[in-house]
Image: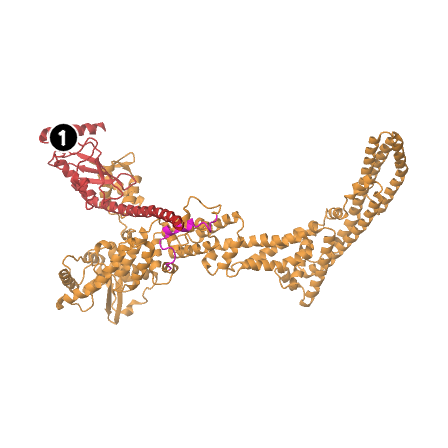
């Protein structure tokens, strides 16, 4: 045992001086330039201590453990010495040599891209060639050290982990030139340029700048120089594993620029499928370039696939998400963009972002007073179709359109718009939809059936609001969705009735074929029972046609008029209420009507005829000195203008008296004739008719005249409380009657509560908070109401 | 086998659709009833000088408070009574439930305010409305039907109008003071 130990110690002792000598020589040869002496001295001291410890142990040769540990310390110290010498050499030699190339040749002016390109191509290539040479030299040196270390196992293990490439990279690029980052960036950009120019894909602005600076014939040479330089530099980087340290950040930022440019190029291209095109683009341009830069490796393949499936896709998805509002506007032309987006929506948070963005753009671009209700409806309908394609579960649609529905609900004319586009003669989406009888005829019963179908069941997406009935989400029937804004069909049916009444009254012919067809379609949608009133209305018209003929045949010749006067006989209970206004009629017409009434009562003894003078339409022709003008207007308008036959001019007061209406009403009617330039007001409150058409000037065929014309024909008392429009004044008597009824039964109430009650139970008495409070204080002043503690009560 | 399998499914779907039909029917009615009640309310505005009046109690149109004044020339002259009218969802095809809120000493009114009036029971017709109901009750005050009394004491006392009026006023004021 002790003999063996002694022999090992002797062996080590005999060899150690040689080892030390060898080390010194290697260190000396490795550091051709003087390295920092202090380091060496320090290392030598440590080495000396280690050797002493070793020999100390060797004396006590029987203590194997102590000797082994001393040997390990010695080997470690040796390894440290060798490696620090190597590092020192790299730091002292390779790094300065590399940076010297770049620092010693002055850089050209930054504004001249051509010069920069040339400079970069030349110097980067040179610098990396120097780097390659010095790393290679160190590699050879280190291999020699390794050979020597083979003889001492613990030493060899300690220095084997040393990697010249890694160390060189770390040391050389630890303190780069300040402008190095910019250089590499430009160099990477240039390399893509050189690569892309060959492939005719030149998205980066370098191309333009280079073309500005470099004569055309030199471009190819430059491109080749850059190509060669980049090939050389990249191969050095690949061999010495410098891609990550030197190139990667700039490669990624270059890719980022490319992806952004590519995404931008795809903006507003809704008609093509950009998703596929983007994949092809990656395969054609960035992918080969990446292989060129990074070399064929798994990492490179991963980067390319990431670029395809995530980077560009997400960028495109984000673009399409922000463009979704316009995509919906363009639908169905934009169907391809939608299928792209559908394929690109991978993450749940993308859906959430999409909902948020789209909601915001709806609110910004659509849900404001400046947008027309038909436009909002059109966009909503388009959104229903488009979002259905995007997400057939309907959750996105539901979430995005909730504010739209709410907003439409709040708009007064929504129902009118929906109903009129359902039955309008002009082609509209809704009309097609109505005619499409295959769509669920009776939406609510149909939906439950499809829900039970388990074959195609898919879970509801996570962000679905489960408190909402799924039926709405599932239904793709646009009309059902629109109806569901209001919860019931009633209001549509009523509105249709009002509209139908309007249309029937304002046609002079008894032609109702079109309306009959509409009615049949609506019956499918709303059910027969709901359409009963409208059906009776149409039957009234048909019967009126027959009755009118037979009644007129029975009338005495004496009362016959020299113009046709057709009567429509309505079943009062089935028609909406008409606003009746006193409408004085010319004597012959009144006589005719009396005779008509008599003849009718003979024909239909059980029926009574009540005339609605103000309802209907009159075609009148106004004769002027130099010609005549024809108008189709409401009877009230006609009777007003006829007054001017009798007398001219009229004052406002006289007209009010003659027509037995209020000032506001007369003014409104006059406004129509003034807009038509038939009546002029001069001076104020005095009206006269022009005598020549030539005096008319250009008739005001602007918006004003149009809307007045509509008003002139629109004489139905719509349920929405339209009649209050012209008459802003509060009807005090009515209001007091209502309030006193309320207070008689309920005792005393605060003003707010009364106002709420009025809103709920007297919708035909629209009143705003301010005028109601004024009314209340008037009543208190008149001694009709008493107030105490904020509550009002009747004075007994 | 086939018929055994299909038969239950058919019945299941039939029962599934039936409640739906019913519910839509009742909501449609609900809307029509609301409209009718609203119209009646507006019509009542003109009836204040007849000594009758009514108004929805709160946020529902289906429960009203009514007020009637005793007709002059009867013992009830100068007195005013509050009533509670509750409308069924099948109104006007079913009669509303009408009870006196103010205790009313009357041969045809019991102490809980129930009224014995034929038009509120078997003689009800959809042609009646709040106005006619209130007018009928108002005239019932002056012309009780002593054949079928709900309040025996009042019916017995009716013949003696002076005594009746004394007791009536005593009870009316008692109630008024209670408040």
Quarter of the image for residue A672 reads bottom left
Residue A647 seen by the camera: no
- Residue A492 image offset from top left, x and y in percent: 32, 53
- In this rendering, the answer to whether A53 lies above or below A679 is above
Report the side of A417 relative to A571 (left or right). right
Residue A457 is one of the magenta-drawn residues? yes
Range shown magenta: A436-458
How many residues crowd mark 1 within 10 Å: few (<14), some (14–19), many (20+)? Answer: many
Kind of element beneath mark 1? helix
Chain letter of mark 1 equals B
Q: Nearer the viewer, residue A698 or B151?
A: B151
Judging by the rendered image, the residue that carries numbered circle 1 is B154
Q: Which residue is at the front of the view, A127 or A132?
A: A132
Which chain does red denote in the image? B
Spot the residue most to the bottom: A626
Residue B110 place in picture, x, y as percent: 18, 32
| Residue A717 screen position, x and y as percent | 26, 54
- For the point 28% across and 58% down, the residue is A500
**Quadrant into which the N terminus of chain A falls:** top right
| Residue A431 higher or lower than B65, as above or below | below
Q: Is residue B83 magenta?
A: no
Q: Residue at x 61, y 55 (%)?
A: A257
Closer-to-camera residue (B154/A89): B154
| Shown colour of chain A | orange
Could you say which is closer to the camera, residue A283 or residue B123? B123
């Amino acid at each position: 045992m002790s003999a063996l130990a002694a022999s090992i110690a002797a062996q080590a002792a005999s060899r150690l001086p040689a080892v030390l000598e060898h080390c010194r020589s290697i260190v000396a040869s490795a550091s051709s330039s003087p390295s920092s002496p202090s380091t060496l001295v320090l290392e030598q001291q440590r080495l000396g201590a280690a050797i002493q410890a070793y020999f100390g142990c060797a004396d006590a040769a029987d203590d194997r453990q102590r000797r082994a540990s001393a040997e390990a310390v010695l080997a470690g110290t040796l390894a440290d010495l060798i490696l620090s010498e190597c590092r020192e050499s790299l730091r002292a030699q390779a790094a300065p040599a590399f940076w010297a190339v770049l620092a010693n040749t002055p850089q050209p002016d930054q504004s001249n891209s051509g010069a920069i390109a040339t400079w970069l191509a030349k110097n980067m290539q040179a610098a990396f060639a120097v780097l390659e040479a010095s790393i290679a030299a160190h590699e050879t040196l280190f291999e020699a050290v390794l050979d020597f270390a083979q003889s001492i196992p613990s030493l060899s293990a300690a220095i084997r982990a040393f990697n010249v490439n890694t160390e060189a990279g770390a040391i050389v690029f630890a303190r780069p030139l300040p402008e190095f980052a910019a250089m590499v960036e430009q160099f990477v950009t240039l390399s893509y340029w050189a690569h892309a120019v060959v492939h005719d894909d030149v998205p980066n602005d370098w191309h333009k700048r280079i073309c500005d600076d470099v004569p055309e014939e030199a471009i190819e040479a430059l491109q080749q120089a850059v190509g060669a330089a980049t090939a050389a530099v990249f191969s050095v980087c690949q061999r010495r594993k410098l891609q990550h340290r030197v190139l990667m950040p700039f490669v990624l930022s270059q890719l980022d620029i490319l992806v952004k440019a590519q995404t931008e190029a795809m903006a507003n291209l809704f008609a093509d499928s950009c998703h596929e095109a983007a994949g092809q683009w990656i395969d054609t341009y960035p992918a080969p370039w990446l292989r060129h830069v990074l070399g064929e490796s798994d990492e490179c393949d991963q980067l390319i696939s990431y670029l395809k499936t995530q980077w560009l896709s997400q960028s495109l998805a984000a673009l399409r998400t922000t463009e979704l509002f316009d995509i919906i506007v363009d639908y169905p032309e934009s169907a391809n963009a939608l299928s792209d987006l559908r394929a690109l929506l991978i993450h749940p948070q993308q859906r959430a972002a999409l909902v948020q963005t789209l909601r915001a753009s709806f609110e910004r671009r659509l849900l404001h007073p400046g947008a027309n209700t038909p436009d909002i409806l059109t966009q909503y309908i388009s959104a229903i179709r488009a979002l259905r394609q995007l997400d057939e579960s309907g959750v996105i649609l539901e979430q995005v359109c909730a504010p739209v529905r709410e907003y439409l609900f709040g708009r007064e004319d929504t129902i009118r718009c929906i109903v009129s586009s359902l039955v309008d003669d002009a082609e509209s989406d809704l009309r097609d939809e109505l005619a499409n009888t295959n769509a669920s005829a009776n939406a609510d019963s149909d939906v439950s059936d499809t829900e039970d179908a388990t074959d195609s069941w898919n879970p509801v997406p996570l962000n679905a609001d489960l408190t909402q009935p799924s039926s709405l989400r599932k239904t793709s029937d646009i009309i059902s969705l629109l109806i569901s804004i209001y919860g019931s069909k009633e209001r549509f049916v009523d509105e249709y009735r009002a509209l139908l009444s309007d249309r029937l009254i304002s046609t002079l012919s008894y032609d109702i074929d079109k309306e009959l067809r509409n009615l049949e379609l609506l019956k499918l949608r709303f059910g027969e029972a709901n359409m009963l009133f409208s059906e009776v209305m149409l039957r009234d018209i048909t019967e009126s046609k027959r009755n009118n003929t037979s009644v007129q045949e029975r009338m005495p010749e004496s009362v016959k008029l020299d113009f046709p006067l057709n009567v429509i006989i309505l079943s009062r209970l089935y028609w909406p209420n008409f606003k009746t206004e006193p409408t004085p009629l010319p004597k012959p017409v009144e006589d005719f009507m009396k005779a008509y009434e008599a003849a009718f009562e003979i024909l239909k003894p059980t029926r009574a005829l009540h005339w609605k003078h103000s309802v209907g339409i009159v075609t009148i022709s106004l004769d002027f000195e130099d010609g005549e003008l024809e108008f189709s207007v409401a009877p009230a308008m006609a009777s007003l203008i006829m007054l001017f036959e009798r007398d001219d001019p009229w004052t406002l007061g006289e007209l009010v008296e003659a027509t037995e209406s209020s000032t506001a009403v007369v003014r409104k009617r006059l406004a129509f004739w003034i807009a038509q330039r038939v009546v002029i007001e001069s001076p104020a409150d005095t009206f006269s008719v022009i005598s020549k058409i030539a005096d008319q000037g250009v008739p005001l065929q602007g918006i004003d005249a149009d809307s007045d014309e509509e008003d002139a024909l629109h004489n139905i008392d719509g349920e929405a409380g339209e009649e209050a429009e012209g008459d802003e004044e509060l009807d005090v008597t009515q209001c007091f009657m209502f309030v006193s009824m309320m207070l008689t039964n309920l005792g005393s109430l605060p003003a707010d509560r009364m106002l709420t009650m009025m809103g709920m139970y007297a919708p035909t008495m629209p009143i705003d908070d301010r005028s109601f409070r004024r009314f209340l204080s008037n009543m208190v002043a008149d001694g009709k109401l008493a107030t105490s503690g904020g509550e009002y009560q009747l004075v007994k | 086998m086939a018929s055994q399998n299909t038969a239950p499914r058919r019945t299941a779907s039939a029962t599934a659709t039936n409640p739906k039909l019913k519910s839509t029917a009742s909501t449609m009615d609900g809307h029509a009833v609301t409209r009718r009640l609203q119209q009646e309310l507006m019509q009542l505005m003109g009836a204040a000088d007849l000594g009758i009046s009514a108004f929805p109690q709160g946020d529902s149109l289906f429960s009203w408070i009514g007020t009637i004044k005793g007709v002059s020339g009867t013992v009830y002259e100068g007195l005013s009574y509050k009533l509670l009218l509750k409308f069924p969802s099948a109104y006007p095809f079913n009669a509303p439930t009408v009870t006196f809120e103010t205790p009313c000493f009357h041969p045809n009114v019991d102490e809980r305010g129930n009224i014995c009036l034929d038009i509120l029971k078997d003689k009800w017709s959809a042609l009646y409305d709040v106005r006619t109901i209130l007018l009928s009750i108002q005239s019932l005050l002056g012309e009780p039907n002593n054949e079928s009394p709900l309040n025996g004491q009042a019916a017995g006392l009716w013949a003696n109008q002076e005594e009746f009026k004394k007791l009536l006023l005593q009870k009316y004021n008692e109630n008024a003071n209670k408040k």
